[in-house]
Amino acid sequence: MSCRKDGSTEIPASCGDFCVRIDSMNLRWLLVALFLSLALALTNVWAIEHSIFWRYVWFDVPMHFFGGVALAVFAVGVLKKRRPVWFVVLLAAVFIAWEIFEYVFGVPKEANYRFDTALDFLMDTLGAVLVYGLARMTVWKK
């Protein structure tokens, strides 16, 4: 692995002569996304083991908010520059896929499934919008 003067890092790929270039700022966003995802996964496992989602029905709301934050941080780390359309498409696809996953595996237990799904999408989106605004003020400031 070699570092360049512009702060980027070259990581040799195992399948050929090309290198993957990772900007140090993007690497930071990706590491934060990894940390947030790990924290979210551990919280989810803990909540399931202790029946938190069933005892406190509101607990799903902050989980979706922080899920939107974690996914948006990952998207910022992947996108080297501001691309709002790709940002929205990538996150919308993941948010929709998650709701399909919840439906297929019988996660929704409420009679008001449509309201719950709409609230999940709202919280995912609010988390993503927060991160998008932060990225616009920092890494995508140009």
Image (tube, grey):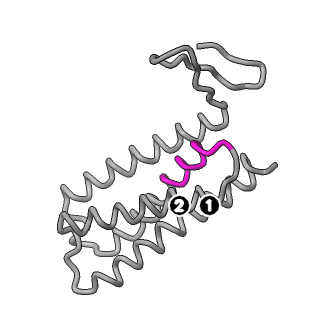
Foreground of the two, 44 or 141 = 141
- Dividing the image into 4 quarters, which one contains the N terminus? top right
Name the secondary structure under disc 1: helix
Q: Residue at x 26, y 53 (%)?
A: 46
Q: Please tell me whether the stretch drawn in magenta is mainly helix, strand or loop.
A: helix
Taking 35 as reference, is 121 above or below it? below
Q: Residue at x 46, y 41 (%)?
A: 35
Name the secondary structure under disc 2: helix
Give the numbered dot on residue 4: none
Q: Residue at x 26, y 65 (%)?
A: 102
- The extreme front residue here reads 16
Q: Which residue does the numbered mark 2 point to in the structure image?
A: 89
Q: Is residue 105 magenta?
A: no
Residue 112 drawn at (x, y percent): 28, 86
Q: Rate crowding at label 2 as few (under 14), some (14 to 19) or many (20 or more) other CA atoms within 10 Å.
A: few
What are the residue bounds of the magenta stretch? Answer: 71-80
Q: Is residue 74 magenta?
A: yes
Residue 111 drawn at (x, y percent): 22, 86
Foreground of the two, 19 or 50 = 19
Q: Which residue does the numbered mark 1 point to in the structure image?
A: 85
Residue 43 drawn at (x, y percent): 33, 53
Say whether marks 1 and 2 touch (CB < 8 Å): yes
Q: Residue at x 69, y 25 (%)?
A: 8
113 lies left or right of 40: left
